[in-house]
Each structure stands twice: as structure tokens, then as C-alpha cells.
């Protein structure tokens, strides 16, 4: 049976979920099985989208294929490469806040983060007045408009990052220059068997890796704190992040105070124990600088709470009393300093009116809150069609 390796991998993956140390409640387990479903879908998509001779950009992660604390403000794409072949990437720049490119040398494994061989954003592209651009990747020497591929290059990852979710996305296409106009070989039984084996390996590796990932970067930190801004692991050359993990009762609140940055993109999100974004479509579980209320002193104050405080910058826990905290800054023109990062204050829910500066000005009505959620739902639906 061709699919037997994948069926066996699903059984192994279910055991990985059920035996995970972070499972403490029935909700944890249910969300773990939901994560498993998305991972099954993603593993199959990754295996079936693997074509280095007739490449195309596929969605790397999304609302139903989440992994690696996916950023709600980002569309992720990837295409596979042969290091000895030449590829042409063309597109039209949208109005989004950042468009970045990264060449990787392999997949994430439970032991390491893949090396980033090249990382840059669209400031290095020659963009025409109509927004169009073109860039080549290949084994030749690096020069303007041409990125040299290292001998172990295997994947091109692209991130398109939104501030205002109603911004216009761009377009992008990749082609291998010596196969344009040709067609791939016909499908064979051996090829299908290989795809099922690859999907099986991707599924279990994906789960093991991102269960280990927080151990590397988060869980050795004191709870309910966040780090100073630092370069994001994985080689994104123009991104800094601040990370932490939380453990709160329903009567406890975190106030996160951070200066509104001069970086084009600044965003915050919560993550589940499975290292995934929460429901960011129907709940305000993330906020970027465009979406946030900025106080008169130039600072953004986010309130992480289970109970509704009636505030514009409420970040909803949606029943998750444990999880991850992350700020990102992208398209930076300078290194960030400690004072650019967040201050964290743990208070009781009832103390908010006295502990939160500009509390009265930050209040929103239930109707205003529904409008905020409706905007998220509508703009996300539009973005998914882009």
C-alpha cells in the first residue's frame, strides 16, 4: 500500500501529541489533535508541492496549517531550489509593510534551526514605478539583481508582512529558466510512493521540532517576563524579536508597555502551548502598531487578560492560561536597544484602572469592539483570496 508509511506516521504523530509534557488539560489535548490535523494537511502539501525543476510558490503556513508561532500579520510562501540551476523570480510589490526573501539549506529538525544562506528584503530590489521587479537566483557570481546560491541551497522562503490588514498584497512567481515551456515527467507509482514517504518524515519531524523549539528559546526564561529585543533566530537579517512565556489566572493581567517603533512593522502575538498562534481572525489575540491604540506619550500599552477589560488594546487569552508572548520588529534600519523593548507588569484585573496610564481614554464600547473584530474577519477573508 503506497500510503502505508504515511498512515504509520499519523499513528506515531498522535502518540507524540498525547504524550507531550505540556498537556495538562482536556483543552490542551483537543488543541493538540487540531494541530495534528493541520500538520497532516501541511505535510501532504509540502510533499506534493516539492518540485525543483518546475517550481512554484506554495503557502507555507496559514490558519489551518499552523506551525512555529506563525505571525498573524504575515503571508508565508516557499519554493524549492536546485543549487546548480538558475531561477527567475518576478512580481509586483504590494502596499504591505515588508517583503523579505530567505534562502535556506534544509528543513527544521528537532536538533537545529536551518542555516540561512541569504536573507534580504525588497529594499535591495530594483522596483519599477509600476511596482514590478525581477531577481535571479543561481550558481553564478553574485551581482546586482542576481543572488548566488550556495552548494547546499534547497529552499526560497518569502514573507509578506501586513500592518493594516486591508493593504494590497503583491504578486510573485518563480520559474526555472531552462525548463520554461517544458512539462514535468508523467506521474509514476514510484514518485507517489516517494511523496508518501516524504510526507511521513515531514509530519513527525515537524511535530518533534516545534515541541523542542520553545525549549531552545523560551522556557528557560522566568515566567511572565520578556527578553530585550534580539535578532530573531533563523537568519532574518532585518528582524528583531522579544519573547517570553506566561502563566496567569483569570484574575491576573499582564500590562506590556513598548514604545511605538520607527520600524515599518511592529507586532505582538500570543501563542498556545503547541507554539501556534491563537485564533486571530475572530479574536484579538494579536496586535500590530497599526492596529493598536498609541498613548499620548508615544507608547503602546497592551493588556493580556482572560476577562474583558473594555480596552482597545485588550489581547484575548481565549481560555489559555499558559502560552507564549512575542514581539517582532521588521524592516529595521538600525539595531534595537533594550529601551526599544517591552516592560512587563503583572497586576490584578481590579487594579487596571489605577495601574494603566490613560485608562479612561483607552476604553471602548461593546459596539466598538464588535467593529474591531468584524474588521479582522473581513480583511482576513479578503487577504486569503489574494
Image: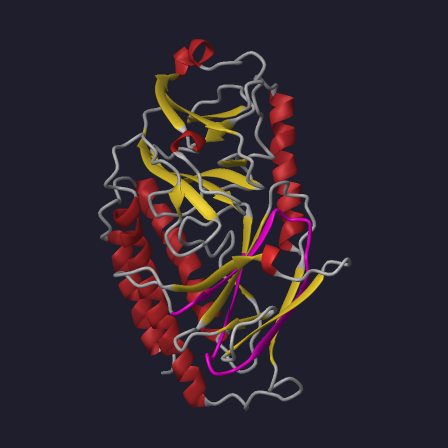
Residue 236 is left or right of residue 385, and the answer is: left
Vertical relation: 157 (above or below) 255: below
Residue 344: x %, y % from top left: 37, 25
Vertical relation: 169 (above or below) 302: below
- Image point (65%, 37%), residue name: 375
Give whichever of 135, 281 is nearer the camera.
135
- Could you say which quadrant of the image residue 339 lies in? top left
Q: Identify the image's colour scheme: rainbow, by chain, secondary structure or one colour.
A: secondary structure
- Could you say which quadrant of the image residue 200 lies in? bottom left
Q: Tell me the magenta residue range.
A: 76-105
Give whichever of 189, 157 is nearer the camera.
157
Q: Main secondary structure of the magenta part?
A: strand
Vertical relation: 35 (above or below) 277: below
Residue 244: x %, y % from top left: 34, 37
Quadrant that contains the C terminus: bottom right
Give whichever of 277, 95 is nearer the camera.
95
Residue 98: x %, y % from top left: 59, 50
Task: Tally the numbered discs.
Answer: 0
- Residue 328, visible in the rendered structure: yes
State the residue lying farthest toward the top: 354
Residue 23 is left or right of residue 168, and the answer is: left
- Image point (40%, 11%), residue name: 351
- Residue 251, visible in the rendered structure: no
State the residue lying farthest toward the right: 130
Q: Is residue 79 magenta?
A: yes
- Could you say which quadrant of the image residue 12 lies in? bottom left
Quadrant that contains the N terminus: bottom left
Residue 260: x %, y % from top left: 53, 30
Amino acid at each position: 500500500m503506497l500510503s502505508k508509511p504515511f498512515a504509520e506516521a499519523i499513528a506515531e504523530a498522535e502518540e507524540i501529541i498525547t504524550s507531550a509534557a505540556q498537556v495538562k488539560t482536556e483543552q490542551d489535548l483537543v488543541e493538540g489533535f487540531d494541530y495534528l490535523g493541520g500538520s497532516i494537511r501541511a505535510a501532504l502539501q509540502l510533499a506534493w508541492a516539492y518540485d525543483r525543476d518546475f517550481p512554484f510558490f506554495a503557502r507555507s503556513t496559514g490558519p489551518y496549517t499552523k506551525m512555529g508561532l506563525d505571525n498573524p500579520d504575515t503571508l508565508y510562501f516557499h519554493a524549492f531550489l536546485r543549487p546548480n540551476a538558475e531561477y527567475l523570480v518576478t512580481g509586483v510589490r504590494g502596499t504591505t509593510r515588508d517583503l523579505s526573501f530567505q534562502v535556506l539549506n534544509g528543513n527544521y529538525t528537532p536538533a537545529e534551526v536551518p542555516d540561512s544562506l541569504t536573507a534580504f528584503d525588497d529594499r535591495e530590489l530594483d522596483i519599477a514605478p509600476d511596482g514590478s521587479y525581477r531577481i535571479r537566483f543561481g550558481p553564478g557570481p553574485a551581482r546586482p539583481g542576481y543572488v548566488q546560491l550556495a552548494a547546499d541551497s534547497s529552499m526560497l522562503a518569502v514573507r509578506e508582512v501586513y500592518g493594516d490588514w486591508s493593504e494590497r498584497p503583491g504578486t510573485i512567481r518563480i520559474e526555472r529558466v531552462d525548463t520554461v515551456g517544458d512539462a514535468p515527467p508523467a506521474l509514476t507509482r514510484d514518485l507517489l510512493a516517494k511523496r508518501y514517504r516524504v510526507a511521513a518524515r515531514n509530519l513527525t519531524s515537524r511535530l518533534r521540532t516545534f515541541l523542542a523549539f520553545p525549549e531552545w528559546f523560551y522556557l528557560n526564561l522566568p515566567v511572565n517576563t520578556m527578553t530585550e529585543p534580539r535578532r530573531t533566530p533563523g537568519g532574518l537579517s532585518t528582524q528583531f524579536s522579544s519573547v517570553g512565556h506566561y502563566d496567569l489566572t483569570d484574575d491576573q493581567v499582564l500590562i506590556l508597555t513598548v514604545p511605538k517603533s520607527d520600524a515599518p512593522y511592529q507586532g505582538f502575538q500570543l501563542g498556545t502551548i503547541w507554539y501556534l498562534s491563537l485564533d486571530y481572525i475572530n479574536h484579538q489575540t494579536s496586535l500590530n502598531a497599526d492596529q493598536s491604540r498609541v498613548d499620548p506619550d508615544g507608547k503602546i500599552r497592551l493588556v493580556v487578560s482572560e476577562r474583558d477589560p473594555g480596552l482597545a488594546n485588550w489581547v484575548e487569552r481565549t481560555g489559555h492560561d499558559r502560552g507564549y508572548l512575542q514581539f517582532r520588529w521588521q524592516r529595521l534600519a538600525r539595531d534595537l536597544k533594550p529601551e526599544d523593548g517591552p516592560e512587563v507588569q503583572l497586576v490584578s484585573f481590579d487594579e487596571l484602572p489605577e495601574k494603566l496610564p490613560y485608562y479612561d481614554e483607552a476604553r471602548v464600547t461593546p459596539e466598538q469592539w464588535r467593529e474591531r473584530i468584524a474588521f479582522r474577519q473581513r480583511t482576513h477573508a479578503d487577504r486569503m483570496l489574494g
